[in-house]
Amino acid sequence: MPTSRDWGDELVASLKWLLIAYSITVVAFVLIAALLFTTTRWGRQFWRLSSAYFTGPGAWRTLGFVAALLFTAVGSVRVTVLLSYQSNDTYTALQDAAEAFAGGKRAALSAAEHAFWFSVFIFAVVVTVHVVRTLVDYYIGQIFEIHWRRWITDRVTTNWLDGHAQYRERFIDATIDNPDQRIQEDITTFVENSRDLSTGAVAAVVTVVSFTSILWNLSGPLTLFGADIPRAMTFVVLIYVLLVSVIAFWIGRPLIRLNFRYQRSSANFRYSLVRVRDNAEGVAFYRGEKNELRGLLSRFGVVLEVYRRLVYRTVGFSGWNLGVSQVSVVLPLIAQAPRFFQGTITLGGLQQTATAFGQIHDSLSFFRENYATFTGYRAALIRLDGLLSAGEQSRALPAVRAEELASALELDHISVSRPDGGLLISELDLRLNPGDALVIKGASGSGKTTLLRTLAGIWPYGTGSVRYPDGNATMFLSQVPYLPLGDLRAVVSYPAEPGDIPDDRLREALTKVHLGHIADRLAEQADWAAILSPGEQQRLAFARVLLTGPRVVLLDEATSAVDEGLEHALYSLLRAEAPEAVVVSVAHRSTVDRFHRERLELGGDGSWALVRSA
């Protein structure tokens, strides 16, 4: 009994098909990708975000992953094509068996039975190949995503932290929200959807080309309004998908904007929850739980409102897609039924027609069915591109010119302004030599802390130049010290790497700043910012100074949370341990003045005066 394929030569035929189809696919993929990268906004955003991953060091491995994924995508189409022919043989064998049984033809019945079991054998072979291909595709895809996510997370995070962008981005015109979500969640969405959409699109196009020839051979003429349409099934599926896709895109277009708004409102709500958690003690002292609850529910209300609109639009979009997909199941059977009843097409041919029609319909509908996914992808891409732009704009903001000076601090024509242009400090010239100590005084809002921010290079409304030792030889201590996540060893060693400083030195430094009660907890993992009191955190910052040994130390209210006795002990310790260090302090307390030989008085209107302390 003849079969729909010459299965004996199928291995050679399939390998030849794979070679040709894969070669064409690679060339077309590269050309289309280049076209998208240059002509579409989202394509340019993609290339800006990931171009170095595909062209920079190690690109050979990246391109190898892409080549392998394209091959498995093309291979999946070939497996589906072979399964459609196998299904044709199975149903044709069953039809022949039924006819032979009804006519009492034993030889024909035996031949049909043999054909059926042979088709089952073919099914087992093809399905085995399909299972292996699916597992290989999954493994390669996941390894590719892991490498890509690692690379792009490093790229985006580095961009966010480089040049103090994580702080200075608040001063740009188009400020960004929730960089944590963009780095964690949006990168995951971007990487996963980039692979799924690209390989899915490749498989869809190859499927359309492959099954169109099958459907063309199986199609017959169709009489419509008195006119005969040859190979009608091919034209029916193309026109049908085109019409329903145009309507689907019209329904789903607002989903891009709604997905962006939903991600932003959700991130804002999550950030509000984190703020309450991080400031739980302050909220409790103020008895502010009701106010916080009201604020949280208000922000959650925004999330629900956006989500409600997203649901309404998704219901319409999904409902339309589901409806037209169900119609596509029965449409080829209705169109081919007259030919089947006339005996011009076998049951297997009818089944393969339905399969081919369904494959072409599903593949042409790929972009329509995945439009909701694409809208989420676009939203993530916009947010990641915005984060990159914010980093670049932040680094482009003006800053005082910083130069290296071995052991002194020198300010040359430093002027500091408010964001609104109001002048705080005008043309400040100052030089402090090793061992000098300066305290900065002035009314609140006169620019004391802002001056330190300017010297650190993070305040964009300053001009002039500053010279001081490079790297950790110059240390800035803020009023609220930063305590990184990790064990106490990492917290005390910061900004040095954990393990760079011996534990004995860490314990000694903690003991000197009156934190001996935690000196034996260096290996303990905890949220130390929540465990240590503000005063203990400030003492820990002084321990870092002792361990680092900077030549210039600038302190911004660095002892405001300790009592005067501890303040005296800490400053005495600093002067004893680092007598040659330049010390600059911002402090409201007069008790700090005794440790400084000079005082800088700021008027807050640009004026300043440098006086020697009594």
Image (cartoon, rainbow, N blue to C red):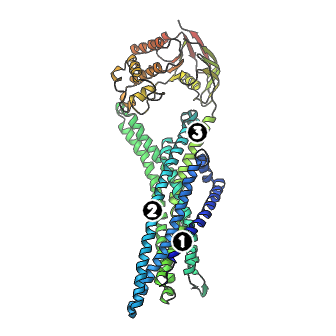
Query: Tag 2's secondary structure?
Result: helix
Farthest bottom residue?
103
Q: Please tell me whether mark 2 or mark 1 is closer to you in this view.
A: 2
Going by the numbered disc 2, the residue's amino acid type is Val
Whole-angstrom CA distance, mark 2 to mark 1, is: 24 Å
Q: Quadrant of residue 288?
A: top left
x, y percent for residue 230: 60, 83
Please tell me which residue lies in front, 596 or 427.
Answer: 596
Query: Tag 1's secondary structure?
Result: helix
Q: Is residue 136 above or below residue 125?
A: above
x, y percent for residue 315: 46, 63
The residue tagged 1 is: 360
The residue tagged 2 is: 132
Q: Is residue 512 above or below residue 196?
A: above
Say few, some or many: other residues with alpha carbon within 10 Å of mark 1 (under 14 / 14 to 19 / 20 or more). many
Q: Earlier in the sequence, mark 2 or mark 3?
A: 2
x, y percent for residue 47: 61, 50
Image point (48%, 17%), residue name: 588
Number of labelled discs?
A: 3
Question: Would you say 436 lies left or right of 86 here?
Answer: right
Q: Earlier in the sequence, mark 1 or mark 3?
A: 1
Question: Would you say 118 lies left or right of 462 here?
Answer: left
Whole-angstrom CA distance, mark 2 to mark 3, is: 44 Å
Label 2–label 1 contact, CB within 8 A: no
Going by the numbered disc 1, the residue's amino acid type is Ile
Please tell me which residue lies in front, 220 or 377.
Answer: 220
Please tell me which residue lies in front, 26 or 238.
Answer: 26
Question: Would you say 309 lies left or right of 294 here?
Answer: right
